[in-house]
Amino acid sequence: MNSLLEKLKNNRTAILLAEIGAYLHLLGRFSKEFIYSNAEDADPNCDNFDYQNICNDNRFFGNFSLKDLLQNDIWKTYLNKFISDKDLKDLKQNLTTFCDFIKKHTWTQTPQGLCKILADAHGIVSGIDKALAGRGKGGKQRKRYTFKTSAFGYGEKIELLENNKLKEEFFNALGEVLEKIKNGLPDISYEDYRNFISLIMNYYSKTIGETRRPINEISLFDYAHMIASLLKSNLVKIIGCGWYEPRGNSKWRVMRINIDVIGLISKGLKIGDISGYKNELDSVYDKLKKIIEYIYPLGNEIYRDSTGIYFSSPDMDISEVISKLREDLTCVDFELQISQSHSSRSLVSLASEREKSLSEIVFPHISKTKVSASMDHEGKDICPVCRIRLKEESKDRCIRCQERYEKRARSWLDKNERSKETIWIDEVADHNDRVALIFGQFDLRKWLSGEYLDTFISQTFESWRNENNSICSKLSINKIEDLEKQFESMFFKTINDNQKELCKSFIGIKPENFTKNFWEPIAERDATGQAMNLTNNPDKAKYLIKLLFRKHPSPARIRRIWNTTEDFIKNTLINNILSKHSYGEASSHVNLRNKRIQLIISPSPNIPIGSTIDIDIDGVRLSPVCVDKSKGIFITTTNLQILSIKGKTPEEISLWMKEKPIKVKKEGDVQWVGGYRITNVIPPNEAFQDYYPYIPIYNYPDQFMLLIPAYDALNIAQKIFEQYEVQFSKVMDRLPFHLGIIAFHRRTPLYIAMDAAKRLIKAFNTKTKTIKAKVESIEDTPENKHRKLTITPDQDFSSVPLEWQISYSTGDPNQEDEWHPYIRIENKPSHTGGYFFDYDGMGNYVVHVKGLKSNDCIKIETSYFKLVFLESASDRFRIDDNLRALDDIKRIDDLWNDIQNLVRNRNIGLAQVYAFWQETKKRYEDYNGDSIWKKFVSSSLINIFKLSPTRDRDLFKKFFQATKDGLLDICIHWNLKVRKQKP
């Protein structure tokens, strides 16, 4: 049995059961008992709760049958049934039930066999900071103020604590799934496997894996999933290569499967083509997951973004599996770039693998066989969508692309699949017939690599010293450099009692041997693998300081980083902002905005269900969709506000349509065809009403793209930015976030807007950089634990100061955030107050926001914003010109409010606003903004806008600056020309 594929297939049940056991080993943490027993003000009755001992605690399971199921004898038969031609040695140590995973998953419990693999994965994923952070009293949360946080320190409620029935609900469902798995043995069906994973993901995500600050950011699912993934991949290596001692020796690789996602979906001519490609890509990902996670189970998905999908992988040659993937996925229209990373003690290589993919992505192509097959259909023209196959002259697409295009509409008509989101771009269009492509991008490169995690701390030196004053006094440790020197000396000699006491302050026990009992257990849990490779004692001491006080790039934390941005996109943006936005607010006839009308065309045009047809009613053209071919029933796919001249309500518009003679044009028709009539018009089924006028194109952890009404685009962008300021307040200087809005007329070919977006995304990536900024002023709001910073960045980034609200709140009024809100500073702080440290060991410092002073020079990453209307197709080639600072979103809104107030309060007409706008713009081009132009602007502000340089000093300066830096041009053009809104 030399074939890896054969080994994986023959060991599938045992591998999947081991993975299931890895998920279940943290089951005891899904409880209020676990959370509250670790609270600062824990009840003495639950203070001794042990999540590893739940199998001996009948109270934990209550009346649920889950405990008996976990201890069922049947698991023993299959948990140990590994088949291999290699010597598996310790792997043959029999496990009896899933309770063995729960009881013995750390090295202190002396695990055996499979549990050794689990213990090593558990140690790597939890990272050294889990063992150390919060060991002192400062890390514990009070019961009333127990929160989970995002990866960037934003506090959120824990759903498990809010819902008293959640545990019962979960345990009942888990029991049902495990019962099905048990009854299906010796095999495990893919359906049962996926149901188990989905259930664990759904419920484990509702609580935290660790209660102590600042490591309360990792959800129980983040924690368990990465442990299960590493165990699974390492187990495969042992089955394939034979047993080895995993403790401190396990290594993994990342398998990446890349595709130019943005390039692929940008090929679509219409939204149906784009959505079709996205759905096909998702289908390919599902097939990949089934093969890699289940059929030949060698790893799990650990990341997915606009560059492709990434899996955990064993540290061995898997070329046989890669060949199988290529063989099984020859049916797709695009090439998959598949490769495997180098081996490492962690998955931090994910970041570098992602960077490699950007240069190795292969442009989508199709095989010669399929090109030849398309010729059999008498194709003569190149399909304008895939640009590979041939199509018939009378058709818009080749057969394959047409199938993909129509599938979307059929899914929309299926009541089981239909969502409130529209799929029709004509319904997205605002009452001015304009659409906007809005997209955002998080630059996660330095976060996924772990570089910026070094700016977070797991505990402060000051808090540790305060809690260990006695031993620090004995060893003369007054600053962190003293501690480093003490560690360096301990590598050379036998440590004394005081030094043993020093070690105990970190790990809870007094080691006899510093290297063996202190350094090595800590170093082997270093997720980067660097610690174990160090040979120089001074380097070890310096690195040890980092491990003891800095947050660590453990696999679970890396996952939590991208999971945080993904949650922001899915929950904050789509489920909150977009779903709750009042579309078309302040526009005319907003009651029509999300309504549809059903009409019957006689005789039936006889087009397929889900297809649209162009109709002409008294010169008004619509494109309704067919929902019943035989009866000729259609539903409008247009924003009815456009028809408001025909009626102010859906009923009035229906009366106008009824019995009207119409002309139609079907796909392939060159001329309009008459002889048709609308015989009946009624409101459609309620399921088709009250749609959301936006279309998600894609959303990944690093970026999103949607179609929304142009009228609402800037307001939606403002809401996104406001939430970014709140949820990412503590890392705004280090987490670049870019927003782009590209508006266009509904009839503009969508591929032009997509191409513009693709170019702008590239510009965002290439132009992001680190710049300097001066802290001009600081306002404290200690009651809210915020500091308002006014900073002046480089002029080529922003012509005006930026105002940032930086939070240092934890949600507990008695505890400030000591761990996250650190800002990079140009020089080592000379002033006292606040925490600061050298975050990379190269003399680059960060300082806590409370330690910042006026005139400090800080470093920030640039975040950009672009707002543009495509007047012509050629505008897309200049899309990367004049990127604005992201903060200008607020300036545009403020400026428009000021213009509205001037018009209303100072008797200024719209013609005067136009005159000021056009004249200052023209003269800037003529005089290139010289002194003559400046005098002209000043006099125009006085004479046209009636602003006094003295009485209206601040407003005068605001308008002058906005005119000078081009923001006024953007503001007026957007509101008067694009939104067509009068002040």
Image: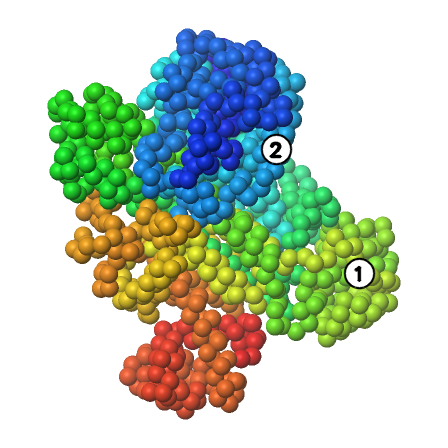
Name above or below for residue 7 compared with residue 30: above
In the rendered structure, the answer to whether residue 645 lies left or right of residue 224 reads right
Cα separation between marks 2 and 1: 44 Å
Residue that mark 2 sits on: 168
Specify whether residue 850 is in view: yes
- Is label 2 in a helix, a strand or a loop? helix
**Residue 465, percent across and down?**
22, 40
| Residue mark closest to the camera, 2 vs 1 | 2
| Residue at screen point 76% across, 55% down | 686
Three-letter code for the amino acid on which mark 1 is drawn = Pro
**Residue 16, percent across and down?**
54, 22
Name above or below for residue 438 compared with residue 294: below
Q: Quadrant of residue 390?
A: top right
Along the viewing direction, whichever of 317 and 505 lies nearer the viewer: 505
Residue that mark 1 sits on: 683
| Residue at screen point 16% across, 55% down | 830
